[in-house]
Image (cartoon, rainbow, N blue to C red):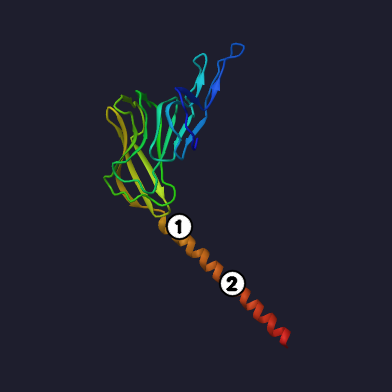
Amino acid sequence: ISGGVFLGIHDISAGVASASLGVNEEATYNTITLSGAPVLNNSNLLGGATSNGGDAFTGNTLNILNRGISAKSVRNFANYNFNLPADTVSGDTIFRVTTNTNISESTIGLQMNGQAPLLNAGAKITLLNTSGNNIIANHINNKAQVSHGISRIYEFDIFTDANNLYASIGEIKANPQLPALMASDSSALITVAQSAKIVGSSIKNALQQTSA
């Protein structure tokens, strides 16, 4: 969902399953991705929905790529992935809802696409704000690691208070694989240079033979 105005209170479900011939239905491994500036203030976002209580949670994912998007509610997502845009600063809020929210048993993921935000250790981002309503977050991960480029790794602490889900940078460190990656790049450059030298010599020899 990358734009548009969604009027009236309604559900947007990534997957819907209805029971048939007594089979217990499942609405699993579905994805909703939010980008741009859609107006979803009256929308309930569901990872899955079933008619007889079947699994509507497993594998369902909500990707939030832009800062400042709001919805009425979210539920039935096993994965919440939050992108931190390049202009993100400490104190920013990525996503808002306006009802009580339960994200228990979910995995919280972070990513940085393009230029890394200018965030230092200790910076705190509000990933999800419930507009004063309660948030329940039992058994979620309390750490997340994000690589940006080949040089930096951001270590985030994930935690909540009564109304918010936060990510705070605990540490920014060099990628321990950076020397090996640089050595690999150097080897590739040496190989290219050697290949170019061989080709150049072959052309030179060919020209000399032609002149003779």
Give coordinates of residue 8: x percent, y percent: 45, 23
- Residue drawn at x 33%, y 28% is 130
Can residue 175 be seen by looking at this rendering? no
Q: Which amino acid does the dot numbered 2 rest on? A: Ala
For this orientation, the residue located farthest to the top is 22
- SS label for mark 2: helix
Residue 208 in the image, given as x and y percentages of width and height: 68, 85
Q: CA distance from mark 1 to mark 2?
A: 23 Å
Q: Quadrant of the C terminus?
A: bottom right
- Residue plotted at (54% across, 21% down): 26
Q: Is residue 185 visible in this depiction of the protein? A: yes
Asked if 116 appears above or below 54 in the picture, the reply is below
Q: Residue at x 40, y 45 (%)?
A: 85
Q: Which mark is drawn over residue 196?
A: 2
Disc 1 marks which residue?
Answer: 181
Residue 161, located in which quarter of the rendered image? top left
Q: Nearer the viewer, residue 142 or 31?
A: 31
Give the mark, 1 or 2, whose residue is nearer the N terminus. 1
Q: Secondary structure at mark 1?
A: helix
| Amino acid bearing label 1 | Leu
